Image (cartoon, helix red, strand yellow):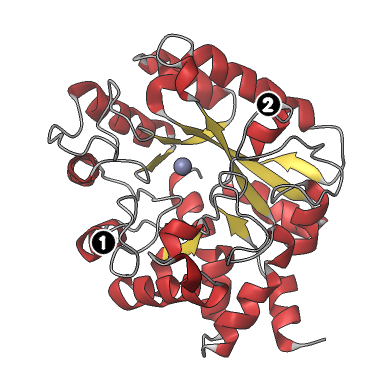
C-alpha cells in the first residue's frame, strides 16, 4: 500500500458542499446535474453512494438549494420537499446515515459508513421566521448560507454588485439564533458587505463552505486575503471549490494542481487549520474534454497524492481532507 493510499484510508474525509440533492429531486430536469439513483454507480454527474465510498468520503454535506422559481413564498415548502427526499434515502442502505453532531461522523468512520450533513443554501427557506429556522434545526439541518446570489430579507448576495447594505436586522437575528442553536453560518454566497456584517456579529466560528482565493482566481465568490484572515481569526474553515471558474480565470489552467495552489494560498494567509474541501460537486457541469479538477468524487485520493507531493505532512493532509471541518463541527454543532 502506498503512503498516500494509507493516509487517505485512515483520514476522516469531509466534503463541505454538493448539490446532489437536486439530481435526486429533479429526475434529470436540472441542466447542471442529470438524474441518477443515489445508490447506483453512475458515469453521470459527480456523486452517488458507490462513488463516495470509492473516494473515501466519510461525510458529505448535502445542500438543500432553493432554486429561484420557488422564491420567495414557496421556499420553506421546497426546503421541506428536499428534506423529505433526503430522509427517503436513509434506511435504503446500511452504508448511509445522517450526521447532526461531530460524533456521528466519527462513528460513521468507525463503521465504514458515509454520512450526510444537511445545509440550507439560501436563507429564503425560513421565510423570515426564526421559528422556521428552529424547525429546520429540529429536522436535522446544521448549516445555512444566508443568501444565494441574490438579495433576500436577511442579506445581500454576491450577485448584487452595487448593493452596499449587507446584513439586515433580521439577518443579524438569524446569525445570533443560529449560533445559539449550534448551526454553522455559511458566508459562501454573500456580498462582501454582508460578509463583513457576519464577521462583526459572529461570536462563533463561521464558514465559507465552497469558495476559493481571489488572489488566484478573480471570481466574485472567491474570498480576498482580508476575508480569509478574518474568517480564520474567528476559527472558521474555507472549503475549496472544484468548479472551474473558481479555480482559474483561464479555463485551460484548471487542474487538480491549480486547486491545490488555492489550498497553499489559504494555508499561507491563514494557516493550515482553516482550509478544507467544498467541491460543489453536482452543482456544475464540465464537458469531458474540458480541463477539470477531477472527474468525480471517486478520484479524491488523487488530492491526497498531490498534497503529499507538495510536501504536506500526514497531519496537514488529514486536516485539509476533513480534520479542520471536524474541529469546527465539534465546536459549533457539538
Ligand atoms: Zn453554491
Indicate if the residue with disc 1 has its beta carbon within 8 Å of ligand 1.
Answer: no
Question: In the image, which disc is placed on residue 68?
Answer: none
Say whether residue 290 is left or right of residue 246. Answer: right
Does residue 84 sit above or below 30 in this rendering? above
Helix, strand or loop at mark 1: helix
Q: Nearer the viewer, residue 266 or 108?
A: 266
Residue wearing tag 1: 233
Image position of 296 (left or right of 149): right
Is residue 13 something that shows in the picture?
yes
Question: Which residue is drawn at the image coordinates 32% and 78% (left, top)?
Answer: 268
Q: Which residue corresponds to mark 2? A: 26
Furthest residue in direction top, as rendered: 73
Residue found 28% across the figure and 27% down from its top: 151
Q: Real-space Cα distance between discs 2 and 1?
A: 39 Å
Q: Nearer the viewer, residue 72 or 105?
A: 72
In the displayed structure, 317 sits above or below 198; it is below
Residue occupying the point 57% across, 63% down: 322
Which is in the foreground here, disc 2 or disc 1?
A: 2
Image marks 2 and 1: residues in contact by CB distance under 8 Å: no
Q: Secondary structure at mark 2?
A: helix
Amino acid at each position: 500500500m502506498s503512503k498516500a493510499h494509507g493516509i487517505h484510508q485512515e483520514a476522516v474525509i469531509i466534503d463541505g458542499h454538493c448539490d446532489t440533492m437536486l439530481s435526486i429531486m429533479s429526475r434529470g430536469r436540472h441542466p447542471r446535474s442529470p438524474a441518477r439513483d443515489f445508490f447506483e454507480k453512475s458515469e453521470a454527474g459527480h456523486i452517488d453512494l458507490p462513488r463516495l465510498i470509492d473516494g473515501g468520503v466519510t461525510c458529505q454535506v448535502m445542500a438543500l438549494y432553493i432554486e429561484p422559481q420557488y422564491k420567495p413564498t414557496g421556499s420553506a415548502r421546497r426546503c421541506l420537499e428536499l428534506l423529505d427526499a433526503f430522509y427517503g434515502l436513509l434506511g435504503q442502505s446500511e452504508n448511509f446515515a445522517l450526521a447532526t453532531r461531530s460524533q456521528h461522523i466519527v462513528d460513521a468512520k468507525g463503521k465504514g459508513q458515509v454520512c450526510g450533513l444537511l445545509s440550507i443554501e439560501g436563507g429564503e427557506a425560513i421565510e423570515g421566521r426564526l421559528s422556521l429556522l428552529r424547525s429546520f434545526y429540529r429536522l436535522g439541518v446544521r448549516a445555512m448560507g444566508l443568501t444565494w446570489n441574490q438579495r433576500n430579507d436577511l442579506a445581500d448576495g454576491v450577485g448584487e454588485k452595487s448593493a452596499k447594505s449587507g446584513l439586515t436586522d433580521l439577518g443579524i437575528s438569524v446569525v445570533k439564533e443560529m449560533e445559539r442553536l449550534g448551526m454553522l453560518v455559511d458566508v459562501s454566497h454573500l456580498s462582501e458587505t454582508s460578509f463583513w456584517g457576519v464577521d462583526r456579529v459572529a461570536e462563533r466560528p463561521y464558514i465559507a463552505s465552497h469558495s476559493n482565493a481571489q488572489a488566484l482566481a478573480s471570481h466574485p465568490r472567491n474570498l480576498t486575503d482580508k476575508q480569509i484572515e478574518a474568517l480564520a481569526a474567528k476559527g472558521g474553515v474555507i472549503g475549496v471549490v472544484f468548479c472551474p471558474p473558481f479555480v482559474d480565470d483561464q479555463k485551460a489552467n484548471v487542474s487538480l494542481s491549480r486547486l491545490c495552489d488555492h489550498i497553499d494560498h489559504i494555508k499561507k494567509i491563514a494557516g493550515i487549520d482553516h482550509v478544507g474541501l467544498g467541491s460543489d460537486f453536482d452543482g456544475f457541469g464540465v464537458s469531458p474534454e474540458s480541463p477539470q479538477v477531477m472527474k468525480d468524487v471517486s478520484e479524491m485520493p488523487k488530492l491526497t497524492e498531490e498534497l503529499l507531493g507538495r510536501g504536506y505532512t500526514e497531519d496537514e493532509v488529514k486536516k485539509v481532507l476533513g480534520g479542520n471541518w471536524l474541529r469546527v463541527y465539534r465546536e459549533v454543532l457539538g
